[in-house]
Amino acid sequence: MATAEAIRALQDRFPELNLIARPLVTYADGRASDQLWIRVPPEHLHDVARFLHDDPRTRFEQLCDLTCVDYLNYPDAADRFGVIYALLSLTHNHRLWLKVFVNDPEPMVPSVTSVWRGAEWPEREVYDMFGIRFAGHPDLRRILMPQNFRDYPLRKDYPLTGEGEREDFELVTRESA
């Protein structure tokens, strides 16, 4: 089954969402990749993910990647953050990307850990680095930054030199390690 057929099944199941497939990459010469993505409203993410995972026509058993993009100051961007889910169907040998867009002041999407257990740590990383909260996550806490760290270092408005937090970290040298 081609990815286009999986998208048709998704569109048939959720006609009210007006899900439109777009090429993941458009090249400078105008060609478009055959890999596709769809925009999913945050409030429908869990239902769409469950359908893509469970339906025999789609069977996206694997969440390959979950990441985020900060579109601050990006030309023509309507939303601040895009949470991106890269899905793989081992059964049908096809891929699909979901994009969910959210904004400040409280960017939040539903957790998909009940659909793909492997989403637990990537959701925590996106929370830790971008401040996107995942409603229903079983253990949403920081994994890379200290628990008392108040900022999100991969946001584009975070200063490149930090905000003085380097002074709070113990200096580790070869001799002391």
Image (spheres, rainbow, N blue to C red):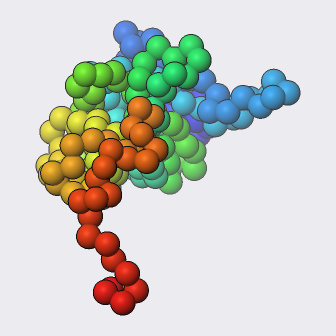
Identify the residue at the far bottom of this view.
175
From this viewpoint, is residue 115 visible? no
**Left or right placement of residue 147 versus residue 73 in this view:** left
Determine the image quadrant of residue 163: top left
From this viewpoint, is residue 175 visible? yes
**For residue 44, above or below residue 83:** above
Identified at 33% across, 86% down, the residue is: 177
- Image coordinates for residue 34, horizontal then vertical, percent: 69, 35
Q: Which of 135 and 128 is in front in this view?
A: 128
Identified at 26% across, 64% down, the residue is: 169
- Image coordinates for residue 160, horizontal then vertical, percent: 46, 44
**Left or right placement of residue 46 versus residue 26 in this view:** left
* Quarter containing the N terminus: top right
Q: How many labels does the image show?
A: 0
- Image coordinates for residue 83, horizontal then vertical, percent: 40, 34
Determine the image quadrant of residue 76: top right
